[in-house]
Amino acid sequence: MIFFLVLLGGAIALVVIGAAVDGMPYLISTGVLLLIIAVLYLLARSVSRSRRRPAA
């Protein structure tokens, strides 16, 4: 969970810096890409956790 929060914080920071500083759209795109990776990581983690539960 810490890894997800670090990715999320980094993505938000990059998007804010890229939006605030003129001429840095690559920071916005990097932040959005990092946000997508963070969401995919959280999704993969939740799917793998749901598969580990034994059937009752």
Image (cartoon, grey):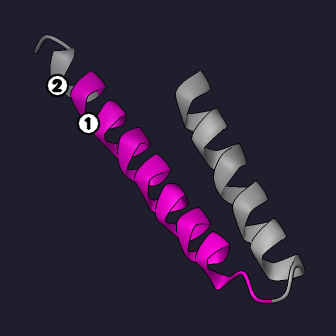
Q: At which x and y percent is residue 16?
A: 81, 68
Q: Is residue 55 visible?
A: yes
Crowding around mark 1 (Cα neighbors within 10 Å: few <14, some 14 to 19, many 20+) is: few
Q: Residue 40 versus residue 18: which sits nearer the camera?
A: 18
- The three-letter code of the residue at mark 2 reads Arg
Residue 25 at what x, y percent from top left? 65, 84
The boundaries of the magenta stretch are 23-49
Task: Residue 47: give its label.
Answer: 1
In the rendered structure, which amino acid carries the disc numbered 1? Val
- In the image, what residue occupies the spot 61% across and 23% down? 2
Position of the C terminus by quadrant? top left
Secondary structure beneath label 2: helix
User: Residue at the spot x=60%, y=64% of the render?
Assistant: 31
> Which numbered circle lies on residue 17?
none
Residue 45 magenta: yes
**Badge 1 vs badge 2, beta-carbon distance below 8 Å:** yes
The disc label shown at residue 51, or none:
2
Instruction: Answer whether residue 1 is visible to the viewer in this image.
Output: no
As rendered, which of 11 and 52 lies closer to the eye? Answer: 11
Residue sitting at the far bottom: 23
Distance from disc 1 to disc 2, alpha carbons, whole Å, reads 6 Å
Residue displayed at 23% across by 28% down: 48
Q: Position of residue 12 (x, y in %)?
A: 73, 58
Secondary structure predominantly adopted by residues drawn in magenta:
helix
